[in-house]
Image: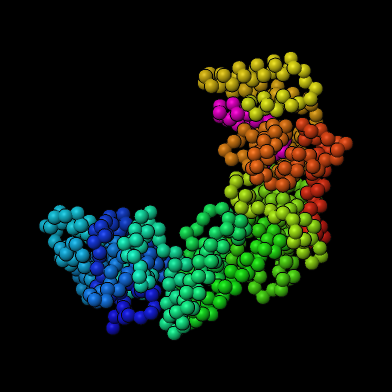
């Protein structure tokens, strides 16, 4: 009994060579078979390494084949999957022709709308005709690659038996029957121009709609689900919402896939096959598509509820921004079965575990040894500053601005010194040139310097820049000497950060260096001017970074606008510790651990 009886079910998981049967027509809009030895050997190696050699039984999934049913002809039009089906045909044919497994058989056939001879050649594989046309050449070359692969195995007959067993029990294709009314040419173009694969979401959508139809529901119900689906997809494409729940500004082919990934459960970072989400959810859909869709609606409502709740938005957004690819799924699991208040407390506890520092522990964090921890602390300071004070129930006002996780995700924010001690990390001539240009502008703003001093120093800077442009020899030695003179000019105008203090939190902030490493190794005044320029241009700057460089944390009486002095560091650090207090480990708890 063939598996391909007509039904409302649009997708099935197929075990290769056991259930894969019927006639497949390769339409005229497709080119011929074009897999070479590389692709063929990779498929056989994958079966060997991922299935046969696996310590425990596991499945191997190929990409889907996409078909439509031709009622008048009683066969399938193969929209996508020709290369895979042809190669599988050749593998099983070899197993039979080699006489190791003479009873092995191919249960399906491939017909070609405009290349009728290719069907016959696939069956005969006549070596004398292999150069008759390009299709024959590729088919025969693939067969030779299969033959060589088996001959190269230490036990060729054993390898043949194992591959045949794997094909019968563990190698799967996803069967996707395109919905009625599909433009097959357009679908083929989309799948093959740029090789855009089907997503879990597309497979799930087809199965949900087909199951709803099979259940006897009114056609309006299918339309309602389709409309909701499109609405969810559009809403999840909001850049701010997407960055909030992914920690990234990058796009997915279908954003609703994120809902299904969460519904499938956390993998704790373990790698899964391409369509594991679909396979995980398929039994639920087949059991009750209506109940499954209600779960999707609830998941969408959960996410949008978090997004519009100002407190949850900031707590969850920070965890996802710092937690990696699978943090969203873990937070969904954390929310399961909890009241709103309990969930908030659990989020704060998770933040404490993520940060892992007490108030006194912040003092020891160092840029050189703890850069990742410093980055999390500084991001949390920015998020908590925008969120504002929260009460004992972990609720903040619903009014006020929101931290933009989208703006944060778009830029290359990293931990940088508010005042850099020197330009030692700069090693290339173009970096020295940029550093000189930046500090030339900064010197102009320093108080207590005469015009004559500046003119003389500017002359030396301009001369060195010309030498750098001319690629003269001995540039680094001249740069280091002038660097010392420039830094001394800044030091003479105030009390710069010196010694080990340069690497501690009171001298660190989030800055977007991009590719400009010279800015990251610049003194405070240079960076302050760049922050002002970016602010005037409307660029996004983390709020605490802006506050530090604009001296919002320092009392007016202690202002030294061009320097980052001890009074600035102390005021900045006091605010940092206060705003982070709800998210730090209690001192007693740290001592006990």
Residue 525 position within the rendered picture, expressed as x and y whole percent measured from the top left: 72, 32
Residue 43 visible in the picture: no
Q: In x, y percent, where is residue 453?
A: 74, 16
**Along the viewing direction, whichever of 18 and 83 lies nearer the viewer:** 83
What residue is at 69 percent from the left and 51 percent from the top? 379
Q: Across the whole image, how many numbered discs are drawn on residues?
A: 0
**Residue 211 occupies which quadrant of the picture?**
bottom left
**Nearer to me, 478 or 543:** 543
Which percent across, then down, holds residue 422?
68, 31
In the image, the segment drawn in magenta is 415-435
Q: Residue at x 59, y 36 (%)?
A: 516
- 5 to the left or right of 391: left
Q: Quadrant of residue 86?
A: bottom left
**The C terminus - image quarter:** bottom right
Q: Quadrant of residue 336?
A: bottom right
User: Which quadrant of the figure contains the N terminus?
Assistant: bottom left
Q: Is residue 199 above or below residue 357?
A: below
Q: Viewer-proximal residue, 462 or 541?
A: 541
On screen, residue 26 above or below 538: below
Residue 424 forms part of the magenta stretch: yes
Q: Is residue 467 magenta?
A: no
Residue at image point 60% right, 17% down:
463
Q: Is residue 587 left or right of residue 464?
A: right
């Amino acid at each position: 009994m063939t598996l391909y009886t007509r039904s409302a079910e649009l997708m099935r998981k197929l075990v290769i060579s056991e259930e894969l049967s019927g006639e497949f027509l390769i339409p005229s809009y497709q080119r011929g078979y074009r897999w070479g030895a590389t692709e063929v050997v990779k498929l056989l190696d994958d079966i060997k390494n991922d299935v046969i050699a696996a310590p425990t039984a596991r499945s191997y999934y190929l990409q889907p084949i996409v078909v439509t049913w031709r009622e008048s002809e009683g066969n399938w039009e193969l929209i996508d999957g020709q290369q895979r089906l042809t190669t599988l045909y050749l593998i099983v044919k070899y197993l039979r022709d080699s006489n190791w497994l003479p009873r092995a058989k191919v249960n399906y056939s491939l017909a070609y709308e405009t290349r009728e001879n290719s069907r016959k050649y696939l069956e005969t594989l006549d070596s004398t005709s292999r150069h008759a046309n390009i299709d024959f050449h590729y088919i025969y070359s693939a067969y030779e690659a299969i033959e060589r692969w088996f001959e190269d195995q230490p036990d060729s007959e054993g390898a043949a038996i194992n591959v045949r067993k794997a094909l019968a029990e563990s190698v799967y294709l996803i069967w996707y029957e395109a919905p009625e009314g599909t433009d097959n040419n357009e679908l083929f173009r989309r799948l093959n121009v740029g090789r855009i694969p089907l997503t879990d979401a597309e497979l799930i959508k087809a199965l949900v709609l087909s199951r709803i139809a099979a259940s006897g529901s009114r056609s309006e119900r299918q339309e309602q689900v389709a409309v909701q689906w499109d609405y969810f997809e559009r809403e999840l494409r909001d850049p701010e919402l997407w960055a909030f729940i992914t920690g990234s500004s990058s796009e997915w082919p279908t954003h609703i896939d994120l809902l299904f990934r969460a519904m499938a459960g956390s993998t704790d970072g373990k790698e899964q096959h391409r369509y594991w989400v679909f396979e995980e959810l398929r039994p639920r859909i087949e059991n009750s598509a209506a109940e499954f869709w209600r779960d999707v609606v609830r998941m969408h409502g959960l996410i949008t509820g978090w997004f519009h709740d100002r407190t949850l938005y900031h707590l969850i957004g920070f965890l996802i921004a710092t937690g990696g690819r699978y943090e969203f799924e873990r937070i969904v699991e954390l929310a399961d079965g909890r009241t709103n208040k309990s969930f908030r407390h659990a989020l704060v506890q998770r933040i404490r575990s993520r940060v892992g520092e007490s108030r006194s522990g912040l003092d020891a964090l160092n840029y050189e040894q703890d850069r990742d921890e410093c980055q999390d602390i500084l991001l949390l300071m920015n998020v908590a500053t925008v969120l504002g004070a929260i009460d004992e129930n972990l609720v903040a006002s619903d009014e006020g601005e929101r931290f933009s996780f989208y703006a944060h995700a778009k830029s290359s924010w990293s931990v940088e010194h508010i005042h850099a001690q020197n330009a030692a990390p700069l090693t290339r001539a173009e970096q020295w040139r940029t550093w000189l240009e930046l500090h030339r502008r900064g010197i102009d703003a320093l108080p207590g310097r005469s015009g004559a001093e500046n003119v003389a120093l500017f002359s030396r800077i301009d001369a060195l820049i010309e030498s750098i442009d001319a690629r003269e020899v001995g540039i680094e030695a001249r740069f280091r000497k002038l660097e010392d003179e420039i830094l001394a000019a800044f030091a003479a105008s105030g009390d710069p950060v010196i010694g080990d203090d340069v690497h501690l939190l009171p001298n660190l902030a989030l800055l977007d260096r991009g590719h400009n490493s010279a800015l990251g190794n610049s003194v405070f005044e240079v960076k302050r001017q760049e922050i002002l320029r970016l602010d005037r241009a409307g660029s996004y700057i983390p709020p605490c970074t802006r506050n530090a460089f604009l001296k919002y944390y320092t009392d007016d009486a202690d202002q030294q606008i061009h320097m980052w002095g001890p009074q600035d560091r102390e005021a900045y650090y006091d605010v940092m510790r206060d705003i982070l207090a709800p998210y730090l480990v209690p001192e007693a708890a740290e001592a006990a651990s």
